[in-house]
Image: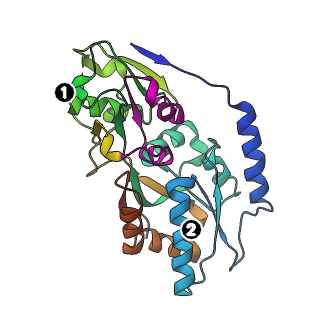
Amino acid sequence: MFLRTTTSRRQALLAAAALVLAALLPSGASAQAGEPLKVYVTPTPQGDILRYVQKLADADHSGLKLKVIESSQGLDANQLLLKGDVDANLFQHRPYFVSWIAAHPEGKGRLVPAATLLVNVFGLYSSKYKSVKDIPEGASILVPNEQTNLPRAFFILQNEGLLKLDHGQSDGSAAALAVDEKSIVANPKKFKFIGTETRLRAKSLPDVAATFINGDIALTHDIDPKSALALEDKAHNPYANILVVRDDKLKDPRVQRLIGYLTGPAVAKFIDDGYKGFVVPVQQRLVP
């Protein structure tokens, strides 16, 4: 059984959009040399990481200046990038980006993943049970209400022996990314799955049998990663967050410097030291 919860966020989104767009003005499709590179991020951990990159750049006297534009209100940062309001964004994993491009073909070829940075480790949490085996038959479990993250939940349950899917593993293939409730071929404990938005899944932890929580969201709710009943595989994880730029910015020296910092050992250490295992570095340059 799969249910979905919905919340009206229109006023919050409009207010957030006004604040973010105010920060962006005046905007221009082409920045002059020496101007800050405008990068849209979600606050934790991406915003923290870019502020650290700015410290590295200042110490190196590299000349890189960043204008970090933060929001957690669900604005369409890819549209902001496509329109030239920002120069890059760092908030999404690759499956989300692929899904967005499929729905917005005008962005194909114009928005380009330039580097991978990190994985926000996805996990199953409960304040009521100490083991996945303790979750009772018929329990309701909160899962993502968006397709780009839903497979992560079901693959964790399959890895723990609580479900059987028609696809073997989370390998980043189109079939794996399409896994949903219809992909379940065995649910022996008759769990009910309630599709719920990201932040509400964390806030609901005390009230439900179990819930799936993104690593960055768990961080902001002071949840101990060691308390997870189960975590997704960190190695070969297809959900790496990516730095995305417009194609006309790929050769911009500021973008090239930013990629260099994001894929370097100092940022890897910053992530390892600062995020308690909730966030792990997965660094790779994707463009020349």
Residue at image point 34% right, 16% down: 139
Residue 211 sits inside the magenta stretch:
yes
Q: Residue 2's x, y, as percent?
A: 42, 16
| Residue lying farthest to the left in this orientation | 161
Q: Residue 280's x, y, as percent?
A: 35, 56
Q: Residue 273's x, y, as percent?
A: 37, 65
Secondary structure beneath dot 2 equals: helix
Q: Is residue 42 visible?
A: yes
Residue at image point 77% right, 61% down: 27
Mark 2 is on which residue type?
Arg
**Label 2 vs label 1: CA separation?**
41 Å
The residue stretch that appears in magenta: 198-224
| Residue lying farthest to the bottom in this orientation | 61
Q: Residues within 10 Å of mark 1 (few under 14, many from 20)?
A: few
Secondary structure beneath dot 1 equals: loop
Say the numbered circle drawn on residue 161: 1
Say the numbered circle drawn on residue 210: none
Q: In the displayed structure, does residue 168 sit left or right of residue 283?
A: left
Task: Judge by depth and name the residue closer to the eye, 94 or 230.
Answer: 230
Residue at image point 42% right, 69% down: 267
- Quarter of the image with the N terminus is top left
282 is higher (above) or lower (below) than 51: above
Tag 2 residue: 51
Corner quadrant of residue 39: bottom right
CB under 8 Å between callouts 2 and 1? no
- Quarter of the image with the C terminus is bottom left
24 is higher (above) or lower (below) than 188: below
Q: Is residue 163 visible?
A: no
Q: Residue 265's x, y, as percent?
A: 36, 73
Question: How many numbered circles are shown?
Answer: 2
Residue at image point 47% right, 42% down: 96
198 is higher (above) or lower (below) than 252: above
